[in-house]
Amino acid sequence: MFRYAYCTVLGMKRQMILIMSVLCAFCSDVHAQSAPKDTVYVAQLPEVSIKDRWSNDTERYHYNQKKFYVKTVLPYVNATTALFKEINTRSEDPSVSKRELRKFIADKQQEMKAQFEDKIRSLNVTQGALLVKLIARQTNLNIYKMVAEIKNPLVAVKWQSWALLNGMNLDKKYHPEDEPDLENIMYELGYPLPQSYAAN
């Protein structure tokens, strides 16, 4: 008898819980239908650079060293890129003769030499290679062809020979996909890939 009464009470409790949960679900459904819709706020968050974690301290060291080297050569990259744009603008101006353009280039070369020669001579080979790569990146041009056009082919051959002896190749365009670390560093320093790459 006691067992029967216990089972009945237990069954009633289960039924009450079931009824209450159905009522709660119904009430919340009615409330959701009658309540005004929530406001959804949309915000544009700044882009974040996500880079792979280094597998060891040596990789982290090499990355930070490359970043330091890039910061070292950036002033020369900026000056060279600005000069190239200036030369390019002059060369496209029909009112500027070839003789005037050659004089302009020679004057600018002397100016750059006086300003940067000692500093550039103090760069190590790795920094020199980065300088060449970053100039190629910022101009989206083949450095060998640029030197051959602005100076002359013999000067271009001379510098290409020097570059090859030091493990570089001036006769090659910059390909961002081949330089993921360098691209990440440039992005971190506020130098996204130039718009000229979007057309390619």
Image: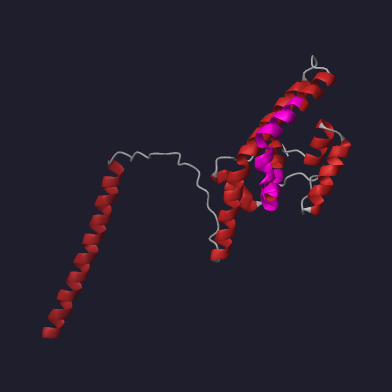
36 left or right of 192? left
- Does the rendering let one see residue 194? no
Q: Is residue 98 above or below residue 168?
A: above
Residue projecting furthest to the top? 95
Residue 116 highlighted magenta (yes or no): yes
Which residue is found at the position 58% from the left and 62% from the top? 59
Q: Position of residue 35 (x, y in %)?
A: 28, 41
Q: Position of residue 176 (x, y in %)?
A: 68, 47
The N terminus lies in which quarter of the figure? bottom left
137 left or right of 30? right
Total marks in image: 0
Magenta-colored segment: predominant secondary structure: helix
81 left or right of 10? right
Which residue is found at the position 73% from the left and 29% from the top? 110
Which residue is found at the position 21% from the left and 68% from the top? 15
Which residue is found at the position 79% from the left and 45% from the top? 170
What's drawn in magenta, residue-wise? 107-134
Residue projecting furthest to the left? 2
Q: Position of residue 72 (x, y in %)?
A: 60, 45
Q: Using the image as rendered, state which of residue 123 and residue 118 is in the foreground.
A: 118
Q: Using the image as rendered, state which of residue 96 and residue 15 is in the foreground.
A: 96
Residue 127 highlighted magenta (yes or no): yes
Residue projecting furthest to the right? 154
105 left or right of 198? right
Q: Using the image as rendered, state which of residue 89 and residue 42 is in the foreground.
A: 89
Location of residue 21 (image quadrant):
bottom left
- Does the rendering let one see residue 87? yes
Q: Is residue 192 above or below residue 22?
A: above
The C terminus lies in which quarter of the figure? top right
Location of residue 95 (image quadrant):
top right
Q: How is the image coloured?
A: secondary structure
Q: Position of residue 37 (x, y in %)?
A: 33, 40
